[in-house]
Image: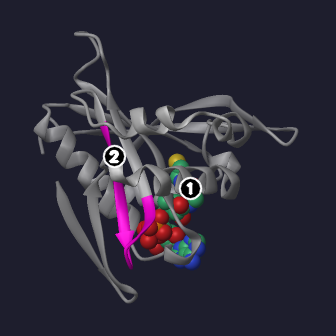
Amino acid sequence: MIDSVHTPKGTVIIREASLADVNQFRDLRLFALKDSPTSFSADYRTIFDLPTSYWEDRLKPTVLGTTFFAEGNSKLVGMTGIRRGDSPKTKHGAGIWGVFIRPEWRGLRIAQGLINMCCEWAKLHEVQILKLAVVSTNESAIRLYERSGFIIYGTEPRALYYDNQYFDELWMSRSLFDS
Ligand SMILES: CC(C)(COP(=O)(O)OP(=O)(O)OC[C@H]1O[C@@H](n2cnc3c(N)ncnc32)[C@H](O)[C@@H]1OP(=O)(O)O)[C@@H](O)C(=O)NCCC(=O)NCCS
């Protein structure tokens, strides 16, 4: 699966991950957890210590999910992942995780290209509903998801705890069964 986003900084390729991405994937994900600690539930220090096999396993596409990257100037500048339910009762739904764009590449609608790719993957795999969680103060991400067809359906109080503060998360969904 491949697509592109044309930006004033050049064309950004949106593509599925491959094992060859393992080192850049680790760098990008660790950078994301350090840059935006309240945007993700994963913890930088915990993830930092994991072996290469952890990163390789996460990169392998399966019927349950995959990872997409945005590549600009031959470097990974953004990422996201999608994972569907693994039981017959939940496999019609999938969650989007880890949406991140490097700061110098923000504001160029690259994340929307990644979300669109997740929607394509979901339709191909007959997923009917996509869900994601976003910290309630993350206005640019909420706008991005609303532009991408997601609606807020609930709030999880105190979903994250970081730096002596609690953060609520909004849960958002997008139906795919009639699109
Ligand atoms: C949220 C995020 C993924 C959006 O990615 P993006 O490709 O920049 O998205 P867009 O180009 O659609 O821009 C989204 C908003 O960012 C704002 N923006 C523009 N330039 C920006 C910049 N240089 N830096 C930060 N935000 C900027 C824009 O105002 C835009 O708001 P708008 O909706 O009113 O137009 C990205 O800002 C990011 O990685 N943030 C940190 C991690 C994060 O919060 N992830 C979401 C987890 S749920």
Q: Would residue 74 be counted in the magenta stretch?
A: yes
Q: With 87 as the anchor, is 159 left or right in this view?
A: right
Q: With 125 as the anchor, is 135 left or right in this view?
A: right
Q: Residue shown at 19%/31% (left/top)?
A: 127
Q: With 6 as the anchor, is 139 left or right in this view?
A: right
Q: Which residues are magenta?
A: 66-78
Residue identifier under label 1: 27
Other residues around mark 2 within 10 Å, as few (<14) / some (14–19) / many (≥20): some
Q: Residue shown at 69%/53% (left/top)?
A: 34
Secondary structure type for disc 2:
helix
Q: Find residue 117 and report its horizontal and vertical position in percent.
A: 25, 53
Give the amino acid at mark 2: Leu
**Dot 2 and dot 1 residues touching (CB under 8 Å):** no
Give the amino acid at mark 1: Asp
Q: Find residue 98 and report its horizontal and vertical position in percent.
A: 49, 46
The residue sitting at the right extreme is 164
Q: Main secondary structure of the magenta part?
A: strand
Residue 126 in view here: yes
Residue identifier under label 2: 19
